[in-house]
Image (cartoon, grey):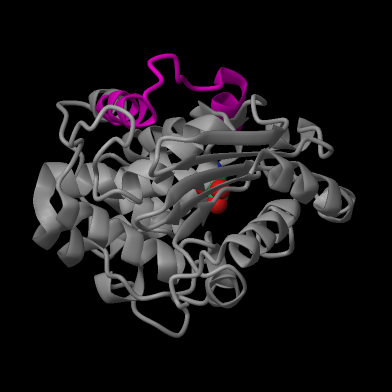
Amino acid sequence: MNALLNDIIKSCAHYTEEGAVANYIPELAKADPSKFGIYVLTHFGQQFSAGDCNAEFTMQSVIKPLILLMALFDSGIQAVHDLVGVEATGKPFDAFNYSDQALTSANINPMINTGSIALCTLIKGDTYRDKFDRLLEFTRKIAANPNMDIDEAVYASEKATGNKNRALGYMLKAYGMINDNIEDVVDCYFRACSVKATCADLARIASVFSNKGKDILTGEQLFDPKYCKYVNAILMTCGMYDGSGEFALRVGFPAKSGVGGGIMGVVPGKMGIGVFSPALDCKGNSLAGVNALEILSRELDLSVFL
Ligand code: GLU
């Protein structure tokens, strides 16, 4: 398996030169596009890796499944489903998208910014700082890495330039979907996007989602399997931005990408995968990362569609 992963890193390396690092958050533009790593944790507890698997990057949208999970955990399926729907929008992650549609719960999902910002309101905590702290604790627990923390420079950069996300927050408020102070709500979201991780962290988190909420290595049940099923279903249909359908065809398992270049791949009943390469395709997915997952899926027969 290590040999296969090394081969994949070698054969996909040219994609790191063909994509482009995200630059709409100034701090992300500093990422080294040549970085490329992959990590796999199987249900037998075996761990394999290749390339820059210890490189740190910010999770960005890869935190969205954790925000969804925390909202489910704290507020239950009904409240989550009532506030944020489950249908793919077919539009970019930060689209306003409401010129031809009313902004209603039915028209958003937990993997676009509008939905994820809304779900921050369903995380328990007296203040938005408390809500974020609970989310970070939960993420550390699932990743089995107590050292996970935010990248202060990326957080400051997101906060300074994230006016589109503020605007989405105000739209939610204007349409009566949330009531809280928008600066506080989006601060929680900006912090969440700025949490640093490695491929190993993403693989560990993904492995829990692939194992009905149970940690493969410790056997601890970390959350209810029904929440796991909910999150995985949304990842399958909406996890790879408006490239989710193509990803389902080419790779065929639930996954979530972020503009920091990370992708977590959830192979139900088999393994969790973390891949990182910051050069992105036009949809915002790691170009080398998606191609690496496509080869891995083909070689190991991982598509859930058989
Ligand atoms: N912080 C980023 C934003 O909301 C996350 C985007 C992403 O990774 O999709 O703009």
> From which residue to which does the magenta span run?
134-159
Expressed as whole percent of the image width and height from the top left, the position of residue 22 reads: 72, 46
Front-most of 181 and 222?
222
Look at the image and tell me in which quarter the N terminus lies: top right
Residue 163 visible (yes or no): no
In x, y percent, where is residue 276? 66, 41
Task: Residue 296 in the image: state x and y as whole percent.
Answer: 64, 57
- Relative to 300, is 61 on the left or the right? left
Q: Residue at x 45, y 77 (%)?
A: 305
Residue at x 34% of width, y 55% of height:
269
Q: How many labels were placed on the picture?
A: 0
**Is 199 in front, or is 101?**
199
* Coordinates of residue 84 in the picture (x, y in percent): 26, 63
- Point 28% across, 29% down: residue: 138
Q: Dominant secondary structure of the magenta stretch?
A: helix
Q: Residue furthest bottom?
A: 100
- 143 and 24: which one is in front? 143
